[in-house]
Amino acid sequence: MAGSPYDPSRAPVAYGRRAVPQLFSELQQQEAPRRLRALASLCDLLRDPERISCTVSGGSLEQLKVLLKDEDSIVRAKTCELLHLLTAHRIGRQALLSSSFLPHLSELMDDSSSSCRRNVQRVLNRLTLMPAGAEALLTLVPKLMLKLREEEEEEEEDVQVLLLSTLSSCSCLDPLPALASDGVSLLLHKLSDSSTDIRREATAALMALSVCEEGMRQVCEEEVLPVLVDLLRDKDVEVQANAAGVIMYAAIINEGKRQCLDLDVIPILLSLVSQDGEEEKDKERKKALVMYSLRALTALAEAPQGRCLLLEQLSLLGRRSEAAEEDQDIRRNAQNAVRVITWTPCNTGDL
């Protein structure tokens, strides 16, 4: 029986439990080609989830910290690729966080190798899948914002998408670090990007920043709302939903209400509320868009001008609030909108 074909780009792999320890011993060799071959074989092995636990134990991760400082850029990039594979699983993400990898990864954000920088961003993005990871990365938000500006000039779309996604996850926990780093102003420039992925992630990040009052205020001051109103007509449903979400938050404050009404956003939001997905998957994708639009209309109904406009459209909102086949969450939001629109002050003479 013929043996397995020899691959010169990979190191020979021992059988069973010896495979990972044997390859890690190869990583200590002086010759860069040997380290690269060992890294390539480790990357192949770690696509098997059962290999993760033995990789993160026994001090193996400390060896990878050394390789992150290797003078060979290809070794550094391949090491980051290995870390990316580790972070595909919770045990790997926990191990990286507990082993204090963030300072080393932060340094590599400025690496001379574009491949290394890209792999670092992939690792950081995976870490934010855990709340503890997103919290740990909050200290890196100013640097992430700086890198986002740089990548804008270099036009690396995939890295921009990763950066925006990471910033969005971190800002969902705490929007203040990004707001303090001119996050709203920077994201404003991304909203008109030709890439749907960039628009989608930029609007998601902006929505995370708009949750707090400072974020709502900055959205109004930076004149972001006119761009968001245009994005309500975007071809991508997620971009539309995220844009409606930012408008929903901005409309909570008086200045946001005023700007939204000046932009005549109510007819657009009503048209989005009236849309129905023909198939079940379309309904699920549009649920967030409809709910955010209803909540935005509810906030705008608190202004006299908004209430007058919406009183003329009660039949539409009434249908969504009463239909038995309607989604429960949408029906509840529609009922709340109707309640606010039809509210009248108590007649004090009857008391």
Image: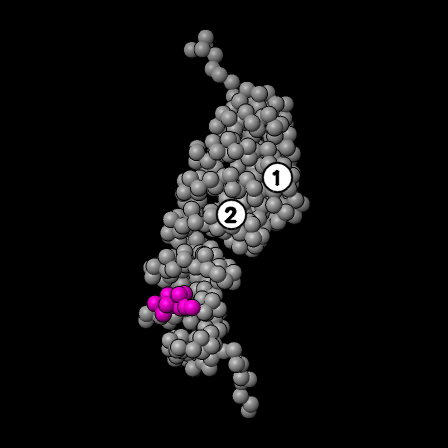
**Can the viewer see residue 173 in this picture?**
yes
Sequence-wise, which precedes: disc 2 or disc 1?
2
Q: Element under label 1? A: helix
From the top left corner, tell me how far across and down residue 275 is, in percent: 65, 38
Q: In which quarter of the image is residue 178?
A: top left
Q: Does the magenta stretch include residue 328?
A: no
Residue named by callout 1: 231
Q: Which residue lies furthest to the right in this view?
A: 278
**Mark 1 surroundings: few (<14), some (14-19) or many (≥20) residues within 10 A:** many
Q: Estimate the x, y position of residue 228 in percent, counting from the top left.
A: 58, 37
Q: Where is the C terminus found, in terms of image quarters? A: top left
C-alpha span from label 2 to label 1: 22 Å
Residue occupied by mark 2? 149
Amino acid on which the number 1 mark rests in the picture: Leu
Residue at image position (55%, 84%) is 5
The magenta stretch is 61-71
Residue at 37%, 51% (x, y): give it.
136
Callout 2 crowding tier (Cα within 10 Å): few <14, some 14–19, many ≥20: some
